[in-house]
Amino acid sequence: MRRLIFFIVGALASWSALAQAQPADAPDISDKAALCSACHGAAGVPTIANVPVLWGQTEGYIYLQLKDLKNNVRASPLMNGIAAGMSRDDMFAYAKYFAAKPWPNLNQPAAQSEVARVALVANSSIGCTGCHLANFQGNSSIPRLAGQKQSYLLASMEAFRSRTRANNPGMSDLMNAASPEDLTALAAYLAGL
Ligand code: HEC
Ligand code: HEC
């Protein structure tokens, strides 16, 4: 747990230091952001399986992911190339732009009671909401999970578990404390919130 807290606190500290260094005249990013909608969706609803919602995601988290995707710390065949050419100001501007949008409704059904029960047991043993906060809304560099696309939630948790997604070893350790069945239930539960 000490190691986990170190990761989280480190991420938060570096995000707030960078946020303070942000120039007041960040470039208008809305034209460039139109390119993102090809996959992330014109009205914020992703058009392709395994693509996450960006609209309304937390600002610090979006910035840190773009940085990790640019530096190949987080491997993604589609996103590594897209992030490769981004400047730090671009990444700040994308984060600010998408975080300010309203979270879209993907019309995913609420999990059935047995599925929700399994997810809530996993939450109480691993303490997801200790970091992802009440109702899984996230904040700053902690991502929102409520209403995220189900196929993406499952793929991202499985990627942490197998350490294919290697940009946060703390999340990988936590996902290894859950069973594959827990992750399936959590993805359905979180998507339906
Ligand atoms: C060709 C499709 C495609 C396009 C275009 C695209 N993305 Fe993505 N994006 C993805 C996929 C797929 C993922 C999930 C990657 C993974 O599984 O690790 C992703 C993930 C992300 C994430 C991480 C979100 C999270 O919840 O972890 C961010 C941030 C992001 N994209 C930003 C952008 C921005 C900004 C643009 C436009 C400049 C963009 N993307 C354009 C496909 C795309
Ligand atoms: C100690 C704090 C902590 C705990 C506990 C925690 N998380 Fe996380 N989680 C994080 C952080 C920080 C990230 C962002 C990781 C990164 O930098 O990519 C994250 C990322 C995620 C993501 C990826 C989101 C995305 O958009 O790609 C999912 C899904 C997730 N967590 C689910 C869970 C679930 C489910 C639990 C409980 C079983 C849990 N987390 C427990 C801190 C935590």
Image (tube, rainbow, N blue to C red):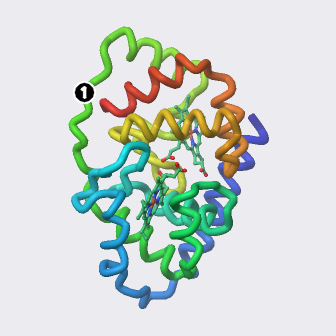
Q: Name the residue under label 1.
A: 109
Quadrant of the drawing holding the N terminus:
top right
Whole-percent x and y of residue 4?
72, 41
Q: Give the residue displayed 63% in from the left and 30% down from the top.
A: 175
Q: Which secondary structure, mark 1? A: loop
Question: Compared to 84, does 132 lie above or below?
Answer: above
Q: Residue at x 35, y 85 (%)?
A: 28
Q: Which amino acid does label 1 sit on?
A: Pro
Residue under the point 42% across and 72% down: 94
Tell me residue 58's x, y (percent). Answer: 43, 56
Answer with left or right where residue 39 lies relative to residue 9. Answer: left
Q: Which of 67 and 128 is in front in this view?
A: 67
Question: Where is residue 148 shown, x and y percent of the image?
Answer: 37, 42
Quarter of the image with the C terminus in it: top left
Q: Quadrant of ligand 2?
A: top right
Question: Which residue appears at 42% of the width and 41% of the height?
Answer: 145
